[in-house]
Amino acid sequence: MALGRSGATPLVGVLLCLAGALSWGAGNVASRRCAGASGLGLTVWGSLFVPLPMLVLSLLVDGPGAVGDALTHFGGAAIASTAYTVILASLVGYTIWNGLMGIYPASNVAPFTLLVPVVGFLAGWVFLGERPNAAAFVGGALLLVGVVVIVLGPRALTRLGARRQSSKRSSVTPSAP
C-alpha cells in the first residue's frame, strides 16, 4: 500500500501511519491482557491519557499561537469531526473492539485491522474523488487475501485434516474374526 502512494503523500505521513500501527499493536496486547474488563471501561480510561501529551506535543510543534487560534476558531466542521471521532470511532468502535479482544482469541479478531487501509483508500476514492493507482489496488487485494488466509486458513486446515481422518477410517476395513 505504501508503494502506491502518490507524490502528494509525504513519506513522513506514511511513517506516522506505521508508528500508529505499532501503537495499535501495543494497545491490542494491553487490551488482551485486560481480558474480562469492560470494553467501554478500557476505552474511557485509555482515552484519559491521550489529551495532555497531545496538547504538549501540539504546543511544541505548532506553538502556543497556533493552538490558541485553533481553539478560538473551532467551527462547525471541527465540531462534527470531533464528535464523530469521540462518539463513533472511539467510544463505539473501541468499545466493540476491546470487547471482542477480551472474548475471542486475538488471532480471530486482529486480522480485520488489515482492512483499514483498504476501506480508507476506497472511501477516499468514493467520497473524495481520489484516484488510487494500480499499486494501491494490488496492495489492497493482497491485504484482502491475507485476511482471508489468516481467518479462514485454520478452519480450512481443520476441515482438510478431518476429511483425511475420515477417509483413512473408511479405507481401513475391519478384519473378520
Image (cartoon, rainbow, N blue to C red):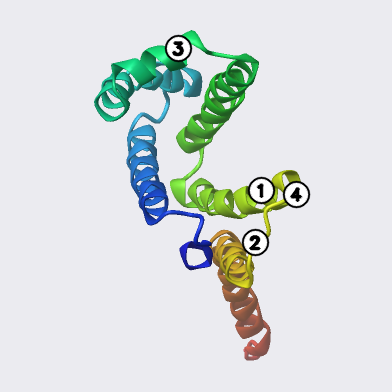
Q: Residue at x 66, y 48 (%)?
A: 124
Nearest the camera: 64 or 49?
A: 64
Tell which residue pokes out farthest to the top in this image: 72
Amino acid on which the number 4 mark rests in the picture: Val
Quadrant of residue 11 within the rendered picture: bottom left
Task: State the CA–CA distance, disc 3 to disc 2.
Answer: 34 Å
Quadrant of residue 163 within the rendered picture: bottom right
Question: Alpha-carbon neighbours of circle 2 within 10 Å: few (<14), some, or many (≥20)?
Answer: some
Is the residue under label 1 in contact with that under label 2 (CB below 8 Å)? yes
Of badges 1 and 3, the one in the foreground is: 3
Which comes sooner in the sequence, label 2 or label 4? 4
Mark 3 lies on residue: 71
Which comes sooner in the sequence, label 1 or label 3? 3
Q: Where is residue 22 in the image (x, y as percent from the top left)?
A: 34, 47
Q: Which residue is drawn at 57% across and 74% down?
A: 161
Is the residue under label 4 in contact with that under label 2 (CB below 8 Å)? no
Mark 2 lies on residue: 132
Residue 150, compared with residue 69, is above or below; it is below
Task: Give the secondary structure at mark 1.
Answer: helix
Amino acid on which the number 3 mark rests in the picture: Leu
**Residue 48 in sight here:** no
Nearest the camera: 167 or 157?
A: 157
Mark 1 lies on residue: 124
Q: Where is residue 147 in the image (x, y as percent from the top left)?
A: 57, 60
Q: Where is residue 99 in the image (x, y as percent from the top left)?
A: 51, 30
